Amino acid sequence: MRVKRSQATRFILALLAGLSGVVCPNARAADPVAIQFTLNRPINAVAAPFVMAQTSGLFSAEGLAVSINAATNSQEAIAKVASGASEMALADINAVMLRYRDKEKPDAAHAKAVFVLLNEPGFAIIARKSRGIQTLADLSGKSLGVVEHDAAARFWPAVAKQNGIKRAAIKQSVISAAVREPMLSAGQVDAVTGSSFLSALNVRDRGVPADDLVLLKFSDYGSEAYGLAVIVNPAFAAAKPDAVKGFVRAVIGGLSLTIKEPARAIEQVVSRMDGGARDLELERLRLILRDNVLTSEVRRNGLGGIDPARFDKSIDQLAEDVKFVKRPTPADVFDDSFLPPLDGRLIN
């Protein structure tokens, strides 16, 4: 009987403490879940939603302790997640397919994407109007710098085929990403493969007049590709599914804040950059939000997801450049189980 009375007494005391707002020593909140999150490149405007989620306390509100670091490219970010060095990362979703699906023995337990940040990736050919280029057809006889291992370059064969462009008639040369903007700005090539919100702005920032640049976006020529997405280590996702869901919710919140206050978001981003130019990054962010995030598909279907039919077409287009031993399906690459319900992803 004494035991029962003691238990009842502790229950009443605990109840009273809860009602009075007093926290009992044995009722401490669980420790936050630590997440190493890797960006696919040194920080710039693309990282704004993650920075806003961190600085606005959205990650901590989900019980997460998120540290943000940067890789040099998507392949490195994916490798960090695959090895467990990072729990999550931002990477090109097409690079996820390349890294895990064109091997002799594809790994069934590879990292998957759980949230698509860029519904439209911005893959493009950036050309000089002064070299007589206005459309894709004008590339015939011109010099095109195709950046090695570049995501846009992977989709160029499909875009060319779909639009009847004979690549043999173009003076293509393989170049590195490091010399892409310098070569185009110096006139060593007439056009390059790249990104509408990275290469195009960077070339203009190097002194090429804006009215001398033409942007041939692959999405305007039939490309179905998606872009940057949040990927997660499979072991972490299995062990901490609620943490992954909380991370995605926080990123959606950070993205919403970024959409509402882009100037504030860029202030936070630039403060973490090494010599970042505020006006350039703000322009970059506004372009990304307008052209790559807030697409008509996103306004219909909400942030973060994919259209399986469109994604399937993008796999076929990627296969024009990559010969998959085992062709992936959308479900092999993207897991929508960590997304919140549609009403939590719609943009007003």
Image (cartoon, helix red, strand yellow):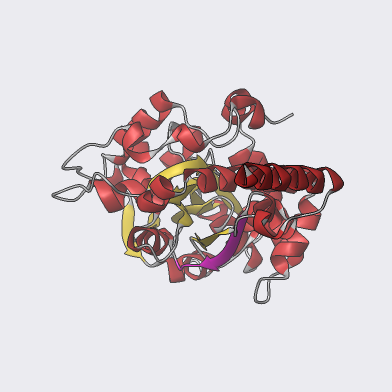
Q: Nearer the viewer, residue 268 or 206?
A: 268
Prevailing secondary structure of the magenta residues? strand
Quarter of the picture containing the N terminus is top right
Q: Nearer the viewer, residue 327 or 108?
A: 108
Where in the figure is residue 181, as x and y percent of width and height? 51, 66
Quick check: 193 left or right of 255? left
* Residue at far left of view: 104
Image mark count? 0
Q: Quadrant of residue 8?
A: top right
Is residue 128 shown in magenta? no
Where in the figure is residue 223, as x and y percent of width and height? 43, 35
The answer to whether residue 33 is seen in the rendering is yes
Where in the figure is residue 105, as x and y percent of width and height? 15, 49
Quick check: 334 left or right of 292? left
Which residue is painted at 29% across and 50% down in the image? Answer: 98
Which residue is painted at 68% across and 76% down in the image? Answer: 275
Quick check: 46 left or right of 150? right
Where in the figure is residue 234, as x and y percent of width and height? 36, 49
Q: Quadrant of residue 224?
A: top left
Q: Which residues are magenta?
A: 64-72
